Image (cartoon, grey):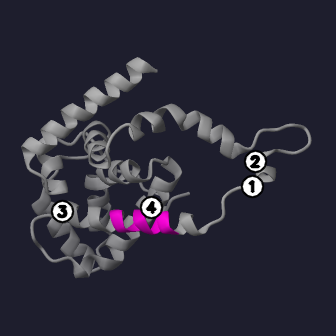
Amino acid sequence: MLFLETVSFPETPEDNPAADEALLLRIADGDQEAFRQLYQHTDRTIYSFILSILKNAQDAEEIMQETYMKVWTSAGSYKPQGKPLAWMFTIARNLCYMKFREQKHQSDLGLDDLAGSETGEVCPQIEDAADHMVLKAALEALKEEERQIVLLKNSSGLKHREIAEALGLPLATVLSKYNRAMKKLEQYLREE
């Protein structure tokens, strides 16, 4: 169980970079309530961002927990620039890439590992892969940046302007990439 799942939070308020920045400064001083508030403001957005990179819910939950642990331990190194979410995205992205490197070094499953016992049971990894195949295939039809924008918009409910600020892109680029990605998804699903 994730340590953050044990805490209940009220509904997420509007994104407020200045407020989040003030929370980070309080977190640097060890303020647990500030940490809870920052988590409340950013959890859906950070999770969507991580999921857009990893494309695996279980890994995304793990990296999300690691991201918030890193925020807790590194808040003192945050340099106020009005972009706390971008700083958190950088932490999350780095942890995602570390996860990719870790997975690359692990050995692949052998054929014997994929078969269940002699009773013919199917391996849970195969069942999970089948359950997520359609979603993953649809997301893979998108470029990484398009996938991030779509997930941040639809999963987190961020406005295009907020996504542009968080990703450091012009608003027109975010709007264009979002519309292009939605057309790609529509076309992909129509063909399937």
Pointer 4: what residue?
63
Q: Position of residue 96 (x, y in %)?
A: 41, 62
Q: Between disc 4 and disc 2, whose residue precedes?
A: 4
Nearest to N terminus: mark 3 or mark 1? 3
Under mark 4, the amino acid is Ile
Query: What is the C-alpha distance between the residues marked 2 and 3?
Result: 46 Å
Q: Residue at x 34, y 48 (%)?
A: 48
Most extreme residue toward the right is: 118
Residue identified by numbered label 3: 20
Q: Nearer the viewer, mark 4 or mark 3?
A: 4
Q: Earlier in the sequence, mark 2 or mark 3?
A: 3
Q: Determine which residue is flagged by label 1.
A: 110
SS at circle 3 = helix
Residue at 27% across, 43% down: 146
> Which type of secondary structure does the marked residue at label 4 adopt?
helix
**Amino acid type indicated by mark 2:** Leu
On residue 24, the disc is none
Residue 89 is a magenta residue:
no
Q: In this view of the protein, which residue sits in the foreground, 89 or 107?
A: 107
Q: Nearer the viewer, mark 4 or mark 1?
A: 1
> Start and end of the magenta stretch?
93-101
Q: Can residue 5 be seen in this snapshot?
A: no
**Tags 2 and 1 touching, CB below 8 Å:** yes
